[in-house]
Amino acid sequence: MDKEKKILHIEDDIENRRLVRHIIEEKGYHYNYAENGLKGLRLAEEIKPDLILVDIVLPDLQGFEITTYLKNLPELSGANIIAVTGHTDAETRSLSKAAGCDDFIAKPFDIESFSKKLDLWLSEKIISKEEPSLQLLQKYNTQLVSKLISKITDLEELNKNLRELNKSISKSKKELEIYNDRLLYLNRLTNFFHEHKNPAELLQLLPTKIVESFPVLRCVFYGVYSNKSLLKPFSYALIKEEYPDPPDINIEPELLDYLADSNNLMFIKNIADETNSQILKLSKGLESKAFILARLTSSNDDVITEISQTEDSIVRKERKHIPDDIIIFIEPKSQRYLFSLYEKRIIDSFLQTIKNIFENSILFDYLMALYKEREEEAIRDGLTKIYNLS
């Protein structure tokens, strides 16, 4: 008996593998195993076993398919392939023959019988006297074709999903590139705004820069006037000259509270989904069904009062040309623009930055006016306005 002979066991059940391994190694043969069909095919080509035990039912390939493939490998022409299955019916036995199996053994094993058959299967090539009928061969071929069609269908679906995934990845990549380009541009734009210390000048520049930076049709900066009941255009930019000048819009003070509850930034993607009467009034007045609203404020009374220590300071006179509140209206080119996750993040970041720059410019403007006032007080008499001689 040649104890160097190798046996390959293709079986997914660990308990069956453990039993077969024990029997094979007790007899001194080399035991090799694979837990699925694909690994079994690869291992068979690699180690070229003298005997192959293949379970009929496996998680990927069927034992019949594995046998058909291995039987067509010239290097394995001398190896017997034994079908192992829990089914003992005549049809399963015949189908295993049709697939090319040299013999058949049922589970659970009779250990003594199995041990004796091992020696037989390893000692000589089995020549089967039982030829499968044409009907069984046709049935077996039909099963193979059906399995092949099923696999092709699965692959087509997988390829379809992969194509969709690639489209999604390409789209995300493109959006990310746009996102990064926007961030770089907005960073430069922020630096540009930092150079403009005058808040009125800043408010005049902002609408045009927003229209240049985003896919926007209109951008209007509304000043809040008349005890917070009227919006009047302070500055604006239109992408088309045929757009009419923005109208004045009557509002209720509750609009500012409503905006404040949304962190002073609202994305109105579809006005049909909105119920707030003030937002609906804005939509009607501006003839827009999708827009962004944001709020800037120049109200730093507490800070300014603390610094100036006077209520009728020249600082307060200088600020009269700037509204206490600015409502920013931005209308995108279409409903699909500016409402993606990337765009929302960019706009949110941009407007927050502008808000900080604007508030700082207001404070800087107040401080400069206060400095001039204090400087004037130092060199002139407060009542006569005559220069002090001392």
Image: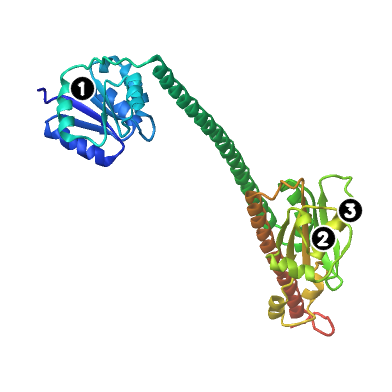
Q: Mark 1 and mark 3: span between their CA atoms?
A: 90 Å
Mark 2, Cα crowd under 10 Å, few <14 / some 14-19 / many 20+, is some
Callouts 1 and 3 close, C-beta under 8 Å? no
Q: Which residue is mark 3?
A: 245
Front in this rendered view, residue 109 or 31: 109
Q: Which residue is mark 1?
A: 50
Q: Label 1 amino acid?
A: Asp
Give the residue at the far left of this rendering.
1
Q: Which mark is residue 263?
A: none
Task: Give the image location of residue 262, x and y in percent.
Answer: 69, 65
Q: Mark 3 or mark 2, which is nearer to you?
A: 2
Give whichever of discs 3 and 2 has the lower sequence position: 3
Task: Give residue 319's quadrant in the image.
Answer: bottom right
The structure residue drawn at horizontal position 68% and vertical position 80%, both measured from the top left corner, is: 306
**Which image quarter holds the N terminus?**
top left
Q: Label 3 amino acid?
A: Asp
Callouts 2 and 1 close, C-beta under 8 Å? no
Q: Is residue 384 left or right of residue 370?
A: right
Q: Which residue is mark 2?
A: 280
Can residue 188 be seen at all in this image of the molecule? no
Front in this rendered view, residue 201 or 3: 3
Task: Give the image location of residue 361, x and y in percent.
Answer: 71, 64
Is 19 drawn above or below residue 326 in the view shown?
A: above
Q: Label 2 amino acid?
A: Leu
Q: Mark 1 or mark 3, which is nearer to you?
A: 1
